[in-house]
Amino acid sequence: MAVNPSQLKNILLNTNNFSGTNKLIDFICKELINLFYEIEVIVFRNNTLICSYNKDYQSNTIKNKELLSTILAKENSTYKTNPTYYRLKNDLEIAVLNLKTEEKDSVDLIINTLNLKLENIFLKEKNTQNSRIKLIENILLNTKDGIQVADITGQMVYINNEVSARLGIPTTDVNKYHVSDFEPLFKDPINWNQHVEVVRKKGIVVIESTNYHVGSKKDIQVELIVSLLEFDGKEYIIAASRDIEERIIARNALLASKVQAEEIVSFKDEFIANMSHEIRTPLNGILGLSRELTKHDLPEEVQEIIKHLRASGKFLSSIINNVLDISKINDGNFNLNIQEIDLNQTLNQVTSIIQPQAVEKGLSYFVTTAPDINSELYTDETCLKQILINVLHNAVKFTNEGKISLDIKNCKDNTDQNKNCLTFTITDTGIGMTEEFIPKLFDKFTQEGTIEKIKNQGTGLGMSITKELVEKLGGRIIVNTRKNKGTTFEITIPFQKVNGTKLSEKAVVDTSVLFRKNILIVEDNPINRLVAKSSLRKYQCKITECENGLEAVQFLKTNNTGIDLILMDIQMPIMDGFEASKKIRNELKLTTPIVGLTANALHFSKENYENFGINECIFKPYDEAHFLNTLSSILEKDNEKVPFDLSHLKKITFEDKTLFNDIILLFFDAIPETIENLEIQLRNNLFADFKKTIHKVKPNIHTFRISEIMDDIDYLNEIDESDFLNTNTTERILKIISTLQAVRTNLKKHLI
């Protein structure tokens, strides 16, 4: 069927509307089907099906040219004639089936036109692609990040201008170099191969490295983002690099600043710790000896002087504590000590410090407590006293005439029904403050610049510490003041109510356990040794004194059985308390309780002390009652110690109470016979029987985890007859007998 010329013209004109290959081919194929209804059009690229069309515009099952040839070769093929093939640009090929002779010229014209159009399109696409390639090449070549490519052997294949400038080689000479020319580590092929495997495994690797300059310029530090690329059947290592010289300089400066800051903090901590130690040590003597004076029958006015002396000493101690607390707060290590207090007693202690100061300046001092206040509260008493004393002390210091008053009232805490909330209002008739200074009042090391500052020198820390402590207690502090009209501080603090069993009703430590105990005091300060001895005098303790850790260790080497408790100062010359305690535990193998005495509360760590074998620690200056209670508690615990551990027995009996108790009773009943046999066998040199006894008791020693003699049992189980009666063996046997006796004494207490 001949094609209408106008139809053909329209088709050819419409090809101008398509700029893309696929859409143009699709248009032509559909138009051919419309013109020549019986034909089928199949498009291949490199013998692989691209698309196919028939009268229903449906693709058939032909997937490649070979399959088409196979179908045509069959006798029952539906195709009436062999296909006409048209080769086009870019490896395209069109097969037209069932084409009639009279239709061929028209189809030839249409497809030839298609081929010409395709050539134009391909040319445009190639030009566009070339432009893009040039753009990408230009971007890669001139980007400020370095781009370098090596093949899988490490041979360089590409570098951009940035890398060229860094390495000192022209981009055109890149093929003359290997990665090992710029990274000495890769001179060993093993290192390079390992590097390639890491990149292959991880996909992307980020590393910091050095670009070594081939010329005279300096080497520079770079960050490399390394990846692996497969192209045209080959693998390449691509590294995008960035100059990080400035980053490293900044990082090193930051690290240097960090080190400097840490050194400053360390210096500060060391200074505060040393200051604390140097003040606490003599203060312990002052408070201790003044306490001893109160035990004597002295005139009333002397007792009153001593009372104020002790109150001031305790206040000085609390100041030291709170300077340390500020340091701990700044370091995030501050902990409150919440306990039951008697508010009236606390206020009396505050008054004993503040009232003498007020009277000395001719000021009136009043304390008013609302009648509905419950004096039994839970709080940190030291913090509360420090808050009140700081504010009242300032009130006295900056008031020249008039009065100071402290009023305490209840207020409500709507957030917690179990809490009381008290407001402490402190008012003075002093010099007041300017409005400009109030925002700076709670800053550290700050005082208002007036003549009064010269008269009333201070650290400028008091109000800063006060605010920190108020906030730690969950409270708030408000100030109202007018210059030369006085100042009022309103401090509101929540308190936990006392419900149920009070702390004061808990079991009291029985200090009678101290009676006639042998106590070793290791302390370089003779006054502090005197204070400790004075506190223990009424218990008729036998006291031995050593002036340093080395002297104590040497004493205990020859006197290791008579000492019941060791009081160990931590900071001493020659050998400190830590080192001495470590030697007592590890070298002398003594389990005697050790109580540390330290004036350094800043870096205290209970775990650290325990690691050196110190059972408990007391801070100087110490309260006598706390001192005696601590020593008594340690001695009571030592008396309660058992030489075995039943956790293993519980495990192997699966916590079956009956089985657990039966095993304990069997061992309990067997111990007397074991002890008797060991004594007879040792006395009569019965080695063979002795070996049987040891072999028999060994499983029980391990089952009950009697650690003190486990090594001795294992040793005796292996000896031969020649070693039986030597001194070492005899001592071990006697130790086993003594330990078994102690085990039997405590064993039945653990039946369940």
Image: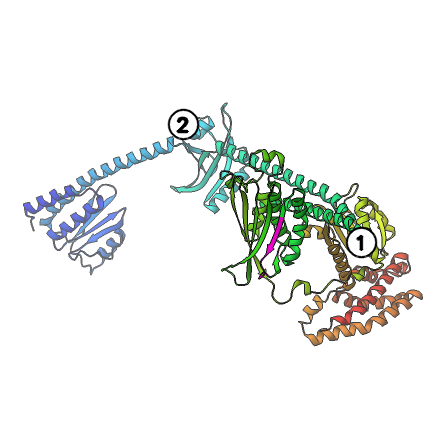
x, y percent for residue 671: 82, 70
Q: Quadrant of the image for the C terminus?
A: bottom right
Residue 306 in view of the camera: yes
Question: Cα distance, mark 1 to mark 2?
Answer: 99 Å
Q: Position of residue 645 (x, y in %)?
A: 73, 65
Mark 1 sits on what residue?
A: 295
Mark found first going from the N terminus, 1 or 2: 2
Q: Nearer the viewer, residue 237 or 386?
A: 386
Instruction: Tell me the magenta residue range.
Output: 365-373
Note whether 504 is above or below 169 in the view shown: below
In the picture, measured across the screen, residue 404 lies left or right of residue 310, that is left
The label number, if any, that marks residue 172 in the structure image: 2
Identify the disc placed on residue 710. Answer: none
Count of numbered circles on the image? 2
Frontmost residue, 458 versus 274: 458
658 relative position to 130: left or right? right
Locate residue 258, reporting x and y percent.
Answer: 57, 37
The amino acid sitting under disc 2 is: Thr
Q: Residue at x 85, y 72 (%)?
A: 673
Above-or-below relation of 688 to 623: below
State which quadrant residue 140 falls in: top left
Residue beneath the point at 59% across and 35% down = 453
Q: Residue furthest right?
A: 684
Q: Secondary structure at mark 1?
A: loop
Q: Nearer the viewer, residue 699 or 385?
A: 385
Residue 75 in the image: x percent, y percent? 20, 59
- Judged from this view, the residue extending furthest toward the top is 216
Tell me if label 1 and label 2 are in contact, CB under 8 Å: no
Looking at the rendered image, the disc whose residue lies closer to the viewer, 1 or 2, is 1
